[in-house]
Image (tube, rainbow, N blue to C red):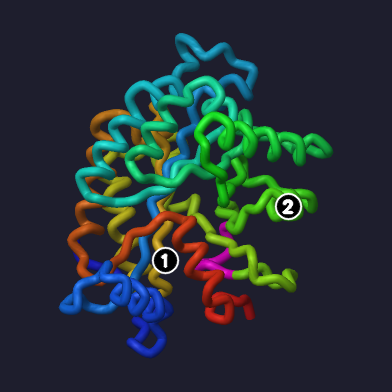
Amino acid sequence: MQAIPYGVPLDAVANPWLTLDRELRAQGLRADSAPPVRAVVCVTVHVDGPAVEVGRKQFPAGLYTAGRYAIRRGVPRHLDILARHAMPATFFACGYDVEHYPETFRAILAAGHEIAAHGYLHEAWDLGEDEPALLEKTHALIQQQLGVTPVGWCSPSGRKSHRTLPVLRRLGYCYDASEKDRDRPYLPADSAADDFVMLPNNTVSLDDYPFYFTGHSLAAEACDNWIEEFEALRQAEGYIHLTVHPKAAGGSGTPARAAAMDRFLAHVAAQPDVHCMTLAALARHCLAHPDAWRTE
């Protein structure tokens, strides 16, 4: 497929990832002969197990088992794909799913991936005054069941309120992956502290859900689109945040759709100027160099 870059490709001086490239080389994580890092890829897996159906007050059986499929087949399939490409990923977990299927998330951690928070029942409604308690509940469940403390969060519905960031900061989070307003990471403009970063996600063209659930796309069509978007961003901001769901229905858990994800990651892995990292690792890098990621 022909790459379709947009705008004017950035030159080496404008490359926002040169500092990361130097850090990786200093740590022995990038070969001296490798070209400079030109793009960062973050693979995020929104597990969205039975928490989704339960949150909708649907009994998770029969017709309403897309989430259970994620736990039983989708997550293992995604873990195999990520292992094949030696790619770390960030898995967003609903508190209900961690509570009822802890072994699934322990397997994710054992494979070297990050666990981040994603609501309790994948709430798709305005939470009002219940929001702080629900954020705290999922945070505590991940700590208690998995023995790790999450540092990242993504709204399960895209909804946020004036309560959201203060609670996340109080709990020790350092990034939010809910915004859709930029093509690269940024520090909140209204924050006086350099302790929190926004890692936007693209729910239009780098998320499997709109392709499969809304657009009824073929797996090959989704893969072709991801490659085009990857190549365009690689020539510009260099930040590619892929979102996949291991469930059935609107996700990439089933065999042909998982194979499309596999083909896309193979394309990514073949590019010598790309570095794959978890959102937590990206957040740490951005917060270590805050001046490079401030908003105008």
Q: Is residue 183 magenta?
A: yes
Amino acid type, mark 2: Arg
**35 lies left or right of 119:** left
Secondary structure, magenta segment, majority class: loop
What is the number of callouts on the image? 2
Magenta range? 180-186
Q: Which residue is mark 1?
A: 239
Q: Which residue is mark 2?
A: 170
What x and y, as percent, mark residue 156? 59, 40
Pointer 1 or 2: first along the chain: 2
Between 74 and 208, the residue placed more toward the observer is 74
Would you place residue 91 above or below residue 67 in this image? below
- Measure the C-alpha gap from mark 1 to mark 2: 28 Å
Amino acid type, mark 1: Tyr
Kindly indicate the quadrant of the structure image that contains residue 6: bottom left
What x and y, as percent, mark residue 267? 21, 56
What x and y, as percent, mark residue 284? 50, 64
Q: Name which residue lies at 28% across and 48% down.
A: 223
Would you place residue 286 above or below residue 85 in this image? below
SS class, disc 2: helix
